Structures are given as C-alpha cells and as structure tokens.
Amino acid sequence: MKHLDEYRDGPSARRVAAAIARTIARPWTIMEVCGGQTHSIVRYGLDQILPTSLELVHGPGCPVCVTPMETIDRAHAIASRPGVIFCSFGDMLRVPGSRGDLLECRSKGADVRIVYSPLDAVNIAAANPERPVVFFAIGFETTAPANAMAAWMAKKRGLGNFSLLVSHVLVPPAISAILDAPDNRVQGFLGPGHVCSVVGCAGYDRLVDRYRVPIVVTGFEPVDLLRGILMLVRQLEEGRAEVENAYGRAVRPEGNAHSLRLIDEVFEVCDRKWRGVGTIAASGYRLREAYRDHDAERLFEVGTIETRESPSCISGEILRGLKKPHDCPAFGRECTPQTPLGATMVSSEGACAAYYSHGRHLESKNGDSSPQRTQRAQR
Amino acid sequence: MCLAVPGRVVELYREHDVRMGKVDFGGISRPVCLEHVPEVRADEYVLVHAGFALVRIDEEEARRVFELMEQLDSLEELREGSP
Ligand code: SF4
C-alpha cells in the first residue's frame, strides 16, 4: 500500500539503524510516547537491532490502557440499562472492569455494538430515534476531531437520543508528569505523530523550553521510527534540545486548524485520572456546557463506583518509563492478555501486552539477542 | 488506538451537509469524513483515523524521507572512501 509499505522496507531500516550505531557515543534512555509506536517497535523488533547503549522505555500513550476502571464500570452500568444501544471502538470490549467486560454485558443481553467511527454511532442514533445511543468516546488528541464531530453533528441534526461517555486524555501534561518526577530517567522523547497531525507542535515547543529535553515528532512505521530515533540521538549527542519533525508528510507545525477549531467548540480541558498513574491536572477533555444534553455522564446516574487494582501490578512505573514488563513478577504468569491485572496488559498497545504477544515473556529479563530475533526488522 | 492509515480518495460527496469521501485502503474502500481536509482532491492521499481524515499526506515531504536516506548512504561512502 502506498505511504505504508515503503516505510517497512528491511534494507532501509537497517541503513538507518547503522547510522544510529555510528552516531551514538554515550548511553541514553529515550521514550516513545505513543502505544502505537510501542507496538511497532516490539512487533518489528526494532529495539533489538539498536545499540545496547540506547534504552527504549515505553510511554503512557495508550488511551485504552489509561482509562480508569471506574470509567469502564460506568460504561458497563450504562450499557446494561434496558433500551440503551452502547457503541464502542472494538479495543474497549475486552477491557475488564470490576465485573467482567463489555462482551459479558452483551452476553447478558446488553446491546453493545462495535463501531469503526463515532460517526457510525451518530447514524445508529438517527436510525433508532426511540432508543438512547451512547458512544464510549475515549482517545488522545488524535481521536478528538472525530469524537467532536460526532457531538457536533448530533447537536446539529437534533439527535437528542445520542450521547457520549467521554474519557479523553492529552499527551503534553503526561510528559510533564513524567519529567516532573524526581526519579525520572527519560532523556528524550519520540513525539506522538498522529496527535501532532491534529494539534501541531506548539505544546511540544513549550515542553522543550521548560525542561530542555529534545522531542522528535515521529511516525509509526519501522523506517519512520528509526529515523526519529536517529534525529533524537543526534540531538542528545550534540547537547541540543529542540522540537524536530521526523513525520513531515503528516505533521504541519501548526496542526490542522479546522480540527483545532471544532475541538475547542465541543470540548474543554479538565483534570483527568489516568489508570496506573493517578490524576494529572488539565490532562483531559470533557464536553462543554453547550453539549450537556449529549453528555452521558450527566444523563445516566449510576451512583458511586469503587474499584480496586491489583496490588502487585507495577504498570504505573512502566507507564512512566521507570520499569519494564520483565520487572513485574506477575508478567506472563498471573497476568496475560487473557487475564490482565493492570493498565499495560489490557490493550495490544500496552507495553506488557506488546511484550507478551511477541513472545518476550519467554526471554530472559535482559533480552535475547539471538540472530533469529534481530532478523524480524529485516523482513 | 492512535493508528491512522493512509488511503487514496476515490470519490467526493456530501452527506448531511458534511464533506465525505470514498477512500481506498489497498483495495478496500470505506466512507471517510473529509470535513477537515477541504483542500483534498480525488486521487490524493489522506491519513484516516476512526473514519475521519486527519490530514492530507504531503507527497513532497514523503519523498524527502528517501532523499535523506540516500544522504545517509553517501555519507557512508565518504567515510568508507576516506583513508
Ligand atoms: S504484567 Fe500485568 S501486573 Fe505486571 S505490570 Fe504489567 S499489567 Fe501490571
């Protein structure tokens, strides 16, 4: 496929990896922010073709992972109401709440539907005017334009039966939280390419000014990721701290002005709790007052919800780049993608699940550098 | 979750007063909201997430990645050629 396959080319990836090896002189720890990037890095084994002096730690950029269990329970309570049609992206269906997941709600009679786009949920509401239709609106800035468009269209088309259960999160406050921690180890970031397609680079300029940390906005394919890593290593070795864009085909510095305008019309910034991490100030979106009639949180009273997380789970430290999945004694034992105990195992983009599904639980803690493994990126 | 896939715009139309398009993803075509990429014409590529086009893909910038790779190679040749 055009604009995809050419960035998966093995020889090109090896050329960039070789350039990284030539450039690096000192050990560095860098973080890819986005779960999609984590998934690609592990899937193609990119971390295993890089110099051992470069450590990649995995960031908090998986919205499925960081959605608090209370919100999942709230979704289940709403989905189980008689008459409700509950629409969700497919990756939320298997995330367990206190009592099972959305698939179990469905097996008990709830009308839970997977949609590919929030706009499909709006059309479901138009086709079922007598039934409440709720869309589970999670995501980072990448998903905000589509979710904002769904709210805007429902309002414009007068679909009073359509509402959104919003649990939106924002990337820059999460990066700040990582850098503010006294035990932080991260020295540079691969910035989230698709988030920046929407919002541009301004928020990242502010982080660089404040923390003097280099950020390279990076795409998701192997060659894109390696190119971002090369640019980041160059900055670190040269002692520079700038925002650089390694994803020019999709990211303009100013972002998408149309999307930014609509997001601002529909959403306002709020404090948000991140699973595994806790509440981060001004790190999410909620619907503005003008959209209160489409806000499922206001429309459906579900009472107080209390949840309890597994005490052995260290996903909070993994999400902040302090630890890796192998550091967790439950990894691949009690905790697997079928029986996830914590945030980073509930979605394929979480670090624990990515490591597990690519066989990393079978390796020793320090990794396995056998040639079979390193060939993965070269296919 | 933040996965966005490049696709080629095949056809443009309006639905409920919103700009939409049929977008081809390697042989599979899907309806996509193009409201935020008003500059896009048929045959151009967009980056699509959750049925929504985030941006038009900049072909010139896409080519630049490969030019930079060639530069990496010529640097390498210089190094190898040096005494
Ligand atoms: S393996 Fe499971 S329990 Fe351990 S940190 Fe990851 S999600 Fe938590």
Image (cartoon, coloured by chain):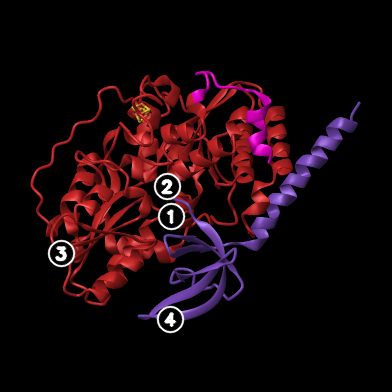
Q: Residue at x 47, y 26 (%)?
A: A361
Q: Which residues are magenta?
A: A362-379
Q: CA distance from mark 2 to mark 1?
A: 8 Å
Q: Which mark is residue A199?
A: 1
User: Of circles 2 and 3, which is in front?
Assistant: 3
Say yes or no: labels 4 and 1 on the same chain: no
Q: Nearer the viewer, residue A47 or A59?
A: A47
Residue A232 sits in quarter: top right
Q: Earlier in the sequence, mark 2 or mark 3?
A: 3
Q: CA distance from mark 4 to mark 2?
A: 34 Å
User: Of circles 4 and 3, which is in front?
Assistant: 3
Residue corresponding to mark 4: B14
Residue corresponding to mark 2: A203
Q: Give the tally of numbered discs.
A: 4
Q: Chain of mark 4?
A: B
Q: Chain of mark 3?
A: A
A67 lies left or right of A192: left
Secondary-structure class at tag 3: loop
Residue corresponding to mark 3: A83
